[in-house]
Image (cartoon, rainbow, N blue to C red):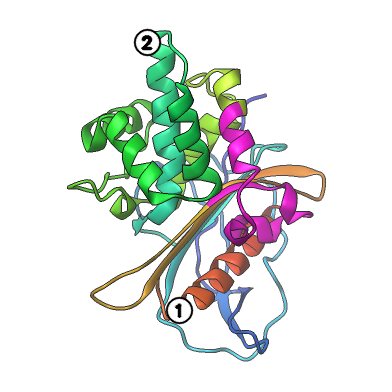
Amino acid sequence: MVKSWKTWLLAAAVSVVLALGAAGMQVSQAATLPESSGTTTSTASATTSTSKTPATAATTSVRAIDTDARYSVAATDLTTGESASSGSGAFDTASIVKVDILAALLWQHQNAGTSLTAAERTLAAAMIERSDNAAATALFTEVGGKAGLEAFNELIGLRNTVVGSSGNWGLTRTTAADQIRLLKIVFGERAVLTATSKAYVTGLMSNVEDDQHFGVSAAADDGDDAALKVGYLQRSQTGLWDVTSIGRIEAGGHAYLVAVLSDGNASYAAGVQLVNAAAKAAVAALG
């Protein structure tokens, strides 16, 4: 089946509920999701329009709370091929780039006709399931660092992703649309990775530790069944937090790829609540 894309740009009528804080305080941001077509860029996604009108993404309005946090979310329904997005611009990946690193490593082994070594498998499991940074640094070096990862990203069409310099893989800059492209390499029909490689990445992303379950998993019928990778990073200059989440979920009998990026969060907890709500809103818009 040929998949059609639909992009929904943030403007002013659908109430996207952003739950902030343990006391049930919420932010309500007004948004509309009009159809748009064109070429995908780093600021606005692009696509062929279709005739479907989406359900409103979270229709309950509550008392608004001011927040300076910025976010972008994109989702694709693998069942229908339709997509939704809100927000724009590039963000730090934090640890979600570890999926990109693993995909690049697997692709390099495929090209060489080799398999991951036992040591690489140990590092890959630690990097994805426990989000171990030392393991990520070792595998980032293994794929050729910035140059090696950017070569892979060029191959798969991550046009708006810039790998972090000087070994700072967590400061890679990316867009929600590019992260959906990456997820399609792992979970979709694109024949960059073999079925065996895709199953390997999926297995690791389906076995992340409990504290790694937030963001895209919040939109799933059963968050424990999500295959995901999250990231979070407190910026030293501002004290504010980057919080990110990407992965595949199932909801309402459909399978979705979802990517949520955010920065400028006042705290880790506020960032988690923001990406949770954004993921739910994007999936609701397609439901």
Query: Residue beneath label 2, please?
Result: 112
Residue that appears at 66% across and 62% down: 280
Viewer-nearest residue: 60 or 271: 271
**Where does residue 135 sit, x and y in percent of width and height?**
39, 42
What segment carries the magenta color? Answer: 200-229
C-alpha gap between disc 2 and disc 1: 44 Å
**Pointer 1 local density, CA inside 10 Å: few below 14, some 14–19, many at least 20:** some
Q: Is residue 126 left or right of residue 135?
A: right
Residue 201 quadrant? top right
Say what secondary structure mark 2 lies in: helix
Upstream in sequence: badge 2 or badge 1 = 2
- Asked if residue 54 lies in the magenta stretch, the reply is no
**Where does residue 44 sit, x and y in percent of width and height?**
40, 53
Viewer-nearest residue: 55 or 202: 202
**Where does residue 153 sit, x and y in percent of width and height?**
34, 33
Q: Are dots 2 and 1 in contact, CB under 8 Å?
A: no
- Asked if residue 226 lies in the magenta stretch, the reply is yes
**Mark 2 belongs to which amino acid?**
Ala
Q: Is residue 42 left or right of residue 14?
A: left
Q: Identify the disc placed on residue 267.
A: 1
Say what secondary structure mark 1 lies in: loop
Locate the C terminus by quadrant.
bottom right
